[in-house]
Amino acid sequence: MPYGDGMNARVRSEERRAEIVGAALEVIAERGYRGASLAAVAERVGLTQQGLLHYFPTKDALLVAVLQERDRWDAVPDTRWRIDLLASLVEYNAMRPAIIQTFSALLGESVTEGHPARAYFTERYAQVRENMTAVLRAEYGDRLPNGLTPERTAPLLIAVMDGLQYQWLLDPESVDMPGAFRDFLRLLGEPVE
Amino acid sequence: MPYGDGMNARVRSEERRAEIVGAALEVIAERGYRGASLAAVAERVGLTQQGLLHYFPTKDALLVAVLQERDRWDAVPDTRWRIDLLASLVEYNAMRPAIIQTFSALLGESVTEGHPARAYFTERYAQVRENMTAVLRAEYGDRLPNGLTPERTAPLLIAVMDGLQYQWLLDPESVDMPGAFRDFLRLLGEPVE
């Protein structure tokens, strides 16, 4: 087989995988992970369930791919995060409700017993608390204007982002998620217009 | 049938219902609502599924009872809430992880399509935002020390409570939920030791 054809086959296979992951994101947003079926994902991309298993042998393998996809999006090198970029991230999130719905549903499920995403979220939050601590320290030093340390502020920053997502997903007309997040930055002592 | 026997039968029936609701809370904490089955709830209270349907004709009817149960616990008359009582509520929540797990799982699921708890959570958050606005106004007047209005602070207060619950459920050793909530009150200008 000429080299070019092998490349094309690989590219086609990767495109197909990406398409399946995209369909899985949608199905999880609609039904949660426990409520999602491989059959529903397969149908959405025009595959049989058997055909889908060629790409992802189990439902959990597909979940891993979904979570890796998220890590790819969020992979801003730590040193480049700044407080004001977080406000932009929240603005951006407000333009992609489907994806926020997927991960809010998954986070909610992850606290149930033996959930396959539990370890992922536990490690992710430990990591994000560490990153946010570094961002806050770079901005404010060892104490914020209100006297809290970066270590004690980081969990609050993350909690506000997550908690606002639920209120906003449930009632987007009543909750201005980016505005509320800017208000929180104002509580930290960030100058906001 | 003598009056007394009728009373006893009613009391027994209500005890049975309460037992079923308790079992449903556990099963939802373990599996979420979509992952919960009436069969699992029935088994936990030693009933057949048919026997359970006598008390709750559908899974959604049982969910309604679960949500009403929550409303009963939280039914502190509005005028009695004070900021410092919220800190006590979070301390109390940290002693009942199972119930917090149930409602964190339900909140997560509620953002998925056509979830039977969605309307409940949407209305509940609108109500809680209003109640918290009143609490903040009673404490601080029309502006908090940082310049935010009670209306703009209420969604943040609720978001922090919800968001901290997820971080704490996933990693109770690393996250001091009551301490973090007191830190948030400190951001609002509340004197904290």
Image: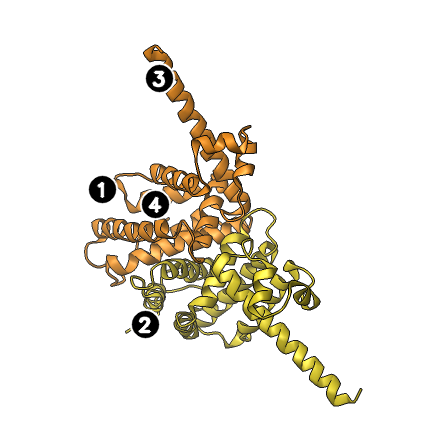
Chain colours: A yellow, B orange
Q: Quadrant of residue B188?
A: bottom left
Q: Residues within 10 Å of mark 1 (few under 14, many from 20)?
A: few
Q: Which residue is mark 3?
A: B7
> How far apart, in angstroms, are the residues tagged by discs 4 and 3?
39 Å
Q: Specify whether B49 is left or right of A62.
A: left
Q: Is residue B103 visible?
A: yes
**Residue type at the position of mark 3:** Met
Q: Nearer the viewer, mark 3 or mark 2?
A: 3
> How far apart, in angstroms, are the residues tagged by discs 4 and 2?
28 Å
Q: Nearer the viewer, mark 2 or mark 1?
A: 1
Q: Specify whether B183 is left or right of A107.
A: left
> How far apart, in angstroms, are the residues tagged by discs 4 and 1?
13 Å
> How far apart, in angstroms, are the residues tagged by discs 3 and 2?
65 Å
State which chain disc 3 sits on. Answer: B
Image marks 3 and 2: residues in contact by CB distance under 8 Å: no
Image marks 4 and 3: residues in contact by CB distance under 8 Å: no
Q: Secondary structure at mark 4?
A: helix
